[in-house]
Amino acid sequence: MKDPPKTTADLSLVVFAACNGLRIAGYLPQMFKLARTPSVAQAFCFATWTLFAAANISTAVYAGTVLGDAVIGGVQALGALCCTALIGLAWWRCRHPVSESRVSAPAGQLPVQQEEHEHDANRSRTGRRVRMRMRAARRAGWRPA
């Protein structure tokens, strides 16, 4: 078994590795949520995640060029990759929305929930058309008997 860290530098490296390992693992639930729940992409803050990615990239470059530390640079580069993946997934979800009920439905089946939604959408379109025709008729001088 390896000896416990003896210096402050050793201890800080262990804490850094543990925290960043958990941070990178924490990106996975975000990715799964975006993949499984398309409506989540509407609440995704692109500016925040872009800032996180930029911070990870700049830290990776600094660690690699100034400090010469490949471990810190690699961990930060992996964090930047995860942030970029989240940004890409959210961007894709915003442009290719899928109803949540279709995501959870068996292949080839349209869920009842989706059918009801489509029925409501058709009914509201029909109601809108009728209201528009009634307004036009009133403007033209027609009055109901």
Image (tube, rainbow, N blue to C red):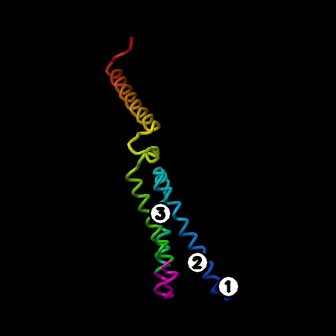
Looking at numbered disc 3 in the image, what kind of residue is underneath it? Ala
Write down the residue under mark 2: 17
Look at 47% across and 77% down and name the residue there.
58
Foreground label between 1 and 3 = 1
Q: Residue at x 41, y 48 (%)?
A: 98
Q: Nearer the viewer, residue 36 or 87?
A: 36
Residue at (37, 28) in percent of width and height? 126
Of the two numbered discs 1 and 2 in the rendering, the one whose residue sits closer to the viewer: 1
Residue 22's spot in the image, x, y percent? Answer: 58, 70
Q: Which residue is mark 3?
A: 47
Total numbered circles: 3
* Mark 1 and mark 3 residues within 8 Å of each other at the beta carbon: no
Indicate the secondary structure of the residue bearing disc 1: loop
| Quadrant of the rendering where the N terminus is positioned | bottom right
Q: Nearer the viewer, mark 2 or mark 3?
A: 2
CA distance separating discs 1 and 3 = 40 Å
> Could you tell me residue 95's position as x and y percent?
38, 53
Q: Was residue 68 drawn as part of the magenta stretch in this picture?
A: yes
Name the element at disc 2.
helix
Residue at 52% over, 81% down:
72
Q: Mark 2 vs mark 3: which is more N-terminal?
A: 2
Extreme residue in the front direction: 1
Residue interval drawn in magenta: 61-74
Mark 3, other Cα within 10 Å: few <14 / some 14–19 / many ≥20: few
Q: Is residue 119 magenta?
A: no
Identify residue for label 1: 4
Quadrant where the image shows the C terminus: top left
